[in-house]
Image: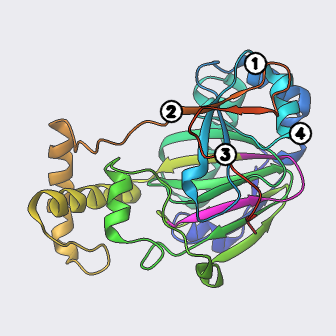
């Protein structure tokens, strides 16, 4: 079987432990031509496809808006992406599409064979986004691989530690108390790993590393794949437990400073809390804030009271 990724011995040893930069050949796959993407959008469950737009200031993550797609089919949505400022997200498409599901299985079989890392909870998202669109500074609780298929973007990855993310904010994401987006300070870019990301490249980074993404002057197609390992699940449970201990008992746990011998007890505590219904974070679900025009998908009609983005400050 032909490898999907091009591996070095160092990458095999460091997978899931370090920030890594791979190359691949999926940008040449017939799965991701225009016509194939249009057909995939049309096969994907209509109520699951997410349409976003966003503001221009990378520090104003409140301007990340979910929209209503209306009756647009895949072809119209692709045209809207080319001409507008949209970000299409087909979440967990590996669970609804046989071809993408087979590709995802092959990816993780290769990861296991090359690195020895066992993975769980594999979710592949397909991202199709407009020129100059961007994703605000945020972090994920699972591990992530990001595959560039078409277009060029800048990816900034930051260390998963203070000042880039506090323990309290990290816990808030794990507890579903807050959104994944975090407060961002532009001077942090000096300490980020910045990659000019081209078709045929893949990035993966350490768990919970904050990151942000800025498309350049082309439509972008990417695969964002979340997964867990036993070690990653352990860390996620420790974070979850720390959040409960802080919020319920006024304690001040720290991922970097708290004694490691306490972690097994925290993992058990987190699992008990989840079995009993979990922490009630009261996170408000995203509500649609705009509608795609019935004739031209690139034209957005914002709801009354929504702060309409203006191009006063563009992400870098």
The quadrant holding residue 313 is bottom right
Residue 29: x %, y % from top left: 86, 39
Q: CA distance from mark 1 to mark 2?
A: 23 Å
The residue that mark 1 highlights is: 42
**Image side of residue 95 versus residue 168, left or right:** right
Separation (CA) of disc 4 from disc 2: 24 Å
* Residue 148 at x, y percent in the picture: 78, 53
For the residues labelled 1 and 2, say whether their Cβ atoms are less than 8 Å apart.
no
| Number of residues whose C-alpha sits closer than 10 Å to that of mark 2, classed few (under 14), some (14–19) or many (20 or more) | few
- The residues tagged by marks 3 and 2 sit, at their Cα atoms, a distance apart of 15 Å
Question: Helix, strand or loop at disc 3?
Answer: loop
Q: Earlier in the sequence, mark 3 or mark 2?
A: 2
- The earlier-in-sequence mark between 4 and 1 is 1
What count of labels does the image hold?
4
Q: Please state, as top left, top right, bottom left or bottom right, where the C terminus lies in the image.
A: bottom right
Q: Which circle marks residue 83 in the picture?
A: 4
Mark closer to the chain start, 1 or 3: 1
Q: Nearer the viewer, residue 18 or 310?
A: 310
| Label whose residue precedes the other's in the sequence (4 or 2) | 4
**284 within the magenta span:** no
User: Foreground mark, 1 or 2?
Assistant: 2
> Compared to 258, does 2 lie above or below?
above
Q: Secondary structure at mark 1?
A: helix
Task: Name the mark nearer the viewer: 4 or 1.
Answer: 4
The image shows residue 19, relative to residue 230, as above or below, that is below
Mark 3 surroundings within 10 Å by alpha-carbon count, few (fewer than 14), some (14 through 19), many (20 or more): some
Q: Which residue is mark 2?
A: 287
Which of marks 3 and 4 precedes in the sequence? 4
Q: Say which quarter of the image contains residue 237.
A: bottom left
Location of mark 3 (residue):
308
Nearer to us of marks 3 and 2 is 3
From where the camera sits, is residue 289 visible? Answer: yes
């Amino acid at each position: 079987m032909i490898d999907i990724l091009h591996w070095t011995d160092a990458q095999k040893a460091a997978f899931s432990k370090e920030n890594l930069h791979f190359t691949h050949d999926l940008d040449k796959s017939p799965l991701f031509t225009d016509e194939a993407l249009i057909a995939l959008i049309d096969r994907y469950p209509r109520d699951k496809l997410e349409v976003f737009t966003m503001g221009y200031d990378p520090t104003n993550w409140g301007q990340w808006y979910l929209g209503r797609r209306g009756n647009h089919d895949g072809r119209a949505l692709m045209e809207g992406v080319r001409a507008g400022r949209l970000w299409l997200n087909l979440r967990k498409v590996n669970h609804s599409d046989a071809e993408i599901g087979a590709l995802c299985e092959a990816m993780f079989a290769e990861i296991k064979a090359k690195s020895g890392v066992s993975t769980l909870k594999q979710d592949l998202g397909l991202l199709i986004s407009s020129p100059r669109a961007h994703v605000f500074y945020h972090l994920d609780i699972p591990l992530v691989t990001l595959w560039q298929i078409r277009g060029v973007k800048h990816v900034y990855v930051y260390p998963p530690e203070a000042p880039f993310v506090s323990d309290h904010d990290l816990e808030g994401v794990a507890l579903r108390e807050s959104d994944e987006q975090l407060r961002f300070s532009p001077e942090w870019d000096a300490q980020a790993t910045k990659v000019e990301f081209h078709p045929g490249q893949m990035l993966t980074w350490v768990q919970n590393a904050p990151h942000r993404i800025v498309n350049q002057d082309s439509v972008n197609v990417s695969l964002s794949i979340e997964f867990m390992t036993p070690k990653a699940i352990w860390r996620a449970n420790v974070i979850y437990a720390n959040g409960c201990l802080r919020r319920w008992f006024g304690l001040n746990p720290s991922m970097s400073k708290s004694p490691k011998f306490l972690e097994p007890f925290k993992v058990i505590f987190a699992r008990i809390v989840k079995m009993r219904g979990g922490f009630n974070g009261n996170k408000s679900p995203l509500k649609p804030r705009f509608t795609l025009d019935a004739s031209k998908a690139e034209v957005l009609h914002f709801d009354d009271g929504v702060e309409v983005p203006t191009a006063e400050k563009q992400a870098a």
